[in-house]
Amino acid sequence: MDITQPLIARNYIGGAFRESSSTFEKLSPVDGRSVALVHEASADDVNDAVMAARAASDGAWGAMSQRERSAMLGKVAGLIEARFDDFVEAELADTGRPRAAAREFDVPRTADTFRLFAGLAGSYPGQSWQTEAPGIMAVNYQLRRPAGVVAAIAPWNMPMVLLAFKIAPALAVGNGVVAKPSEEAPSTASIMAEVFDQAGLPAGAFNLVNGFGVDSAGAFLTSHPSVNRISFTGETSTGAHVMRSAAAMVRPVSLELGGKNPAIVFEDADLAAAIAGTARAAFYNCGQVCLCTERVYVHRSRFDEFVAGLKAEAEKLVIGAPDDAGVQMGPLISRKHRNRVLSFLEIARQDGTIVTGGGVPQFGDARDEGAFVQPTIVTDIPETSRFVTEEVFGPVCHVAPFDDEDEAVALATGSDYGLVSVVWSGNTSRALRVAGRMRSGVVWVNGWLIRDLRTPFGGVGLSGIGKEGGYASLDFYTDQTNVCVKL
């Protein structure tokens, strides 16, 4: 991959790459230069992709034995590793993440995801029941078949990993997939299409369409009547729009949406670990992870010490480009998103106290054309402030004191979102008791972002519908039939 030239991101439909008459540029969040020329799929392109996926699921791909399909996905994993450096460069071009993050997490995790679901699909358990009633003996057993055509719509914040988390299980059980990456992060998906092409999957098993949401590829895909499942990760209001599109044909949706995630730090917590863990949870990937902590509630007896420690952690973070020496935090995805984050920081400035951060770092070079923002800590802000109630999706957190366990739980659960929570405590009984009271899909105790792909993942409330991961993903991407045999 020539990193000195913009990548050409084409659509991949029915086993062939396809260009479009409409194109747009993807700009680097590091310095504003053009890093990709993206071909926007038309309504006809999307229709062709859906029809190709249907033909593959009804034909060669869906009819293939599970052993053969799993072997092909294992080959995909190997090819991802063979193009390791290409994927790293594409990820950095799109997101500006530190190089170490892409090398140590994004690419290895993507390959592991394909291997995991190839294996899980081959060991997918079924159920059977023996039925006895007066004069009746029967055996019931469960069959699973591919759902058909899966629309997989991925976000821009961790584009490679999150797209793989959708398409790997969908493909593993024989569906045809139409993937739509974010317009802000098209590059790794484009290389992934090349990998599928090289792996020799039947034409139409995997398809890629580029574009935007409204009046573009996203809307064309979610409203297409021949799509059987829609898996979407992204912002909550967009997820609601996807639900409305799916409702017309009563199609199942899996929605992993936003979060306003809380952490509780009790007085008996290992405070050094809680400070370091919260700094990572608030500022990792410039706060652009749906699992990031944006609300922190600390026992009043440790509040001042915690805020001082977190401030010190934030201020020593090295901000910069992917290859800058010691870099720990890159830019936001775009200047447009930075403007949104800065608008929330202005709310914080008006409603509370900014302990540190709150602005834009100055570099005196090309990075000033990027989308960088300082890690920010806010205190003394009312729980009713929009900074506290709405997801910012940037390197921010507000810290507030509490006096007892019930108050901490009430504050932590006082949100319409419910994706993840963190509990920091040295008392195991209390930590587990409080974990059981959290209103979220995942609760971490004395840690953050420990993610086993075999476990179910998803939120409640405004954070989404459905679960992804392990057998929960395979269940979503299959139709189940009960066969009853009278004996």
Image (spheres, grey):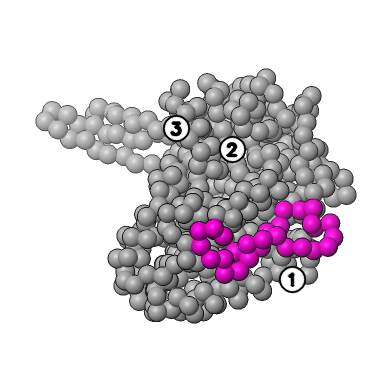
Q: Residue placed at 80% from the left, 49% from the top?
A: 32
Q: Is residue 47 visible?
A: yes
- Which residue bears the numbered disc 2? 153
Sort mark 1 into few (<14), some (14-19) or many (20+) by Cα contacts within 10 Å: few
Q: On the picture, is 209 further left or further right than 290?
A: right
Helix, strand or loop status at disc 3: loop
First to last magenta residue range: 348-377
Q: Quadrant of residue 212?
A: top right
Q: Residue placed at 37% from the left, 56% from the top?
A: 413
Spatial distance from mark 1 to mark 2, Cα to Cα? 33 Å
Spatial distance from mark 3 to mark 1, Cα to Cα? 45 Å
Which is more N-terminal, label 2 or label 1? Answer: 2
Sort mark 2 into few (<14), some (14-19) or many (20+) by Cα contacts within 10 Å: many
User: x, y percentage for residue 350?
Assistant: 54, 58
Q: Amino acid at mark 3?
A: Pro
> Is residue 370 a member of the stretch shown in magenta?
yes
Q: Amino acid at mark 1?
A: Gly
Q: Which mark is residue 326?
A: 1
User: x, y percentage for residue 431?
Assistant: 36, 70
For residue 51, above or below residue 159: above
Answer whether labels 3 and 1 touch (C-beta < 8 Å). no
Q: Nearer the viewer, residue 295 or 22?
A: 295
Q: On the picture, is 104 further left or further right than 486?
A: right
User: x, y percentage for residue 31?
Assistant: 80, 53
- Which residue bears the numbered disc 3? 252
Image quarter in which the C terminus is found: top left
> Is residue 243 a member of the stretch shown in magenta?
no
